[in-house]
Amino acid sequence: MSIVLNGNYSAKKNQTILVEGQEAQSLNILLQGKVDVYLSPFEKVSDIKQENILKNSYKLFSLSGNTFLGPNDLFISGKYSFSYVASEDSNVFSYAAQNREQLETLLNTQKDYAAYIVNSTTLLISNAFSSLSKVNGLIRSLSVLTDNLITFYWSIKEFFGFPCTPSGKFFREGWNIIEKLNEKGVELPREYDPDFFEQDHSELFDIDYTSIPDISMPKLEYYRHFSTLPAELKKSFLSFNPFITAYHCEEASTLLSEIQSDLKEAFNTLESCIKKLYSEDNDCILNEYLRAALEMKKINSDIPVITRVIDYILNKVKEIWGLFESDYNHRLKIDINHINGLQNELKALEKSQFQVTPACFKNVVEVHDGTGSIPVELENSAQKILEYSRIPYDRMEYFMTNLELFRKMKDRLSSDNEAREVRKAITSVFFEVYEGVLKRVIAEKNTSRLYHMFLSFAFMDEKLLSTEHIINLYKLVDNPSSGGFCPVHTMRDWLIKIFNMEKDPSINEFGQDYFDVFRELKRRRDISEKEKIDYENDSYGRLEFEIANMFKTNHRLCYGQISIYVPILHDEMITRDLSKALITSEKISESVRKILDVDFSVFHREVSYRNPDSGIEKELIMKAVIPDFILVPIFGSRAFMWQELTGRNRSTPGRFILPLFTDENPDDLIIKLIGNFRWELCRTMMGVSWNDITQKSLTSEYMDYIQFYKKNRDLSEEAKEKIKSQIQKYHNMTRDIFTADYETWINYESKGIMRLNKVVRGILYKHCPFPREIRATLEKQPLLGDIAVQFKNTRSKYARELENHYNKLTKSGLSLDTELIENLRFYKEM
């Protein structure tokens, strides 16, 4: 049913009245009956079919007669933010109203409706916030449960010594907890204990399960109290002045929009927690306990505690499935028949009635038995690579000795001293090997797949990887990433560019580049000016500098877990299918494009421009320079904005470093890089004035805001508490605090979801402006009215001054070239 005209409508039980994402074309009143309110987990529903929206939605609460359905959507987005389904036969009356202006016209004739609309929106706010609190409670309970199950796994693994080692990222974090507990002398239970699984051990584990609420609690309290006012008083107040009416309606609608957005995020988080516990497609806690049970059966060892935990998890999954069915009318992607089958197989396992992995276990447990064929050229790969590198024999022997120890380790991710020493020994030789192989490949123009895989993927030993992973890597050699508009380089290709002097070496961890080091050596008189040309044209010197500084440092950092880092690709490092985990040029360009669609000027900087042929001596113009993206050959979880410029030239590209393989979302990695880049580029461009508030800039205004927030009268006490928490969370690192706010600016504020405080919003609106189309939509909101007008006036004034300046140039006989025309367009059209 789609209500678009005036009149009465009847809706039968289970009939859909309004669908989330549908254009709001009417003001609808539920006269009689009862309606269930649903919400989908999708951030954008415009490209999703209505039946799929409803199929994936969660029932939140119900509304009874004499209530407006979705009046808030006519004030904000113009699209329904919830779906409404009749839970019994109902009557709805509808007024045609397709936008805010038409609704305000209706309110001028039906003055009592203002109070009813605010009442209805307040009711939606209250119910939606209650739903959010309930979901957050479930998230906390599941987070406690999964963390306890993970730490218990490591505890019994340490005690019983079963050989399999989990590779999932969330399992590695559990091992970190165990390490800390061991240091404190705290022992976890080693017997089956369901009470332990469900108790909150946040203090013991040093985990904070609380989060800073994004919802404005004072606003929430205001509308709660407002709803208790006598009906006649509300009618009189809200119908007295059209501005008051519109303001209350819009403020209430904005608050509801924030809660709706948080609900979507919470449901997605909740399902992620469930997938961590149980998944038929991905690594999960149940999967790891099943592996442990099967491994122990192989060595004829029976550990009842494991099977009892598995049965506990399966019952918990069925309980969660039932809760979603009853409370949210939502069908989780869990096959209950499959769960029951697993429990039956579990009973058989306990009775030792089978000798091989049962069929239903195979759907959950991925078994690598080491069989299968690999290309002949990859056999004995470590020995071949070492010999080809021509490193000294004693170093080769030292490496192979430790590699053999690493192969035999039951737990290659262990952080005990012995494991650390083995990984450290391998690392100490790896980059010597890498440098030796690369030099010979360049000199001989060798196209061997083995050396290509080593240089591009850090593949070195076929005995450390499953056949599936090896074949995947072998195929990836033939599929180089080349799409997208961003310059993306594998480490192999990047280093060849350094060697060929197509690119200058990067900075080291002290911020010095190749040429800065020459100046330092010259100052110390270790080298003379006469040697400068030879130094600058030394291809091998450039290559060695890049490997020793940028590559070696970032390889370790991009892995994300320095305490268990080893540079060679191995199975325990890999947490998802390599072809899906691969970061490609296309993925990077897509992520960057999403940000440019919201922050169009992110790569622009003001540079000097001259063109003697056109008679232009010096003009300041805005120029966009896309950074280089360099992919480090590792399966990692972190990315780094390594430098905002190349050398001292302000028009040169920055350098972003990412892991070649990751189980992180590339969008999340890149938005953090760009937030860091925004900050560092401004610092560099402003020089010593970067934090001088008399010189207005992004960094100076944001630094002033952070330093003096306690005295800022534009900030509420609640906002000041949030800032204090932010500062603590990011250890007083202003760049990281800014980046967190920048992520919110891009992900939420650009969609009209107000999550930043007034001061930060003003700084970002001025220095990280949205495109004109987004600004035109947002400036209708009262919170952005003054900021938008000020920005528009400032930008228009500068554009007029620039246009007048260029007109004078043309009148004097000069012709405007493309760069100046683009600069004028930047200020006039953007």
Image (cartoon, rainbow, N blue to C red):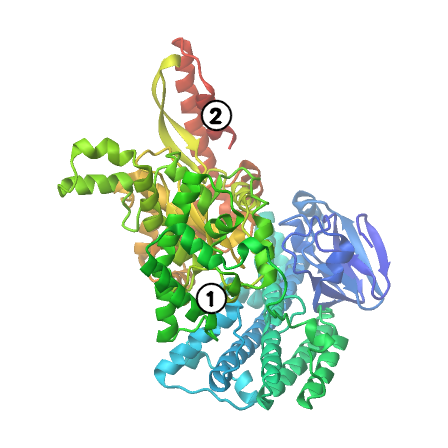
Image coords of residue 577 (percent x, y): 60, 59
State the residue in front, 816 or 89.
Answer: 816
Asked whether the viewer can see residue 128, the reply is: yes
In the visual, does 141 lie left or right of 721? right
In the visual, does 517 lie left or right of 224? left
- Label 1: state its secondary structure: loop
- Give the residue displayed 32% in from the left and 55% down from the top: 392
**Which badge, 1 or 2, comes first in the chain's sequence?**
1
Looking at the rendered structure, the kind of residue marked 2 is Glu
- Give the residue displayed 48% in from the left and 68% down from the top: 211
Asked whether the viewer can see residue 748, the reply is: no
Image quadrant assignment for residue 620: top left
- Give the residue displayed 62% in from the left and 74% down from the top: 287
Give the answer, above or below, for where 342 lies relative to 430. below
State the residue in front, 55 or 391.
Answer: 391
Task: Please identify the quadrant where the N terminus is shown.
Answer: bottom right
Residue identifier under label 1: 212
Q: Residues within 10 Å of mark 1 (few under 14, many from 20)?
A: few
Image coords of residue 609 (percent x, y): 36, 24
Residue 760, which numbered label? none
Image quadrant assignment for residue 335: bottom right
Residue identifier under label 2: 822
State the separation of the CA atoms marked 1 and 2. Answer: 43 Å
State the residue in front, 316 or 184.
Answer: 184
Image coords of residue 174 (percent x, y): 48, 74
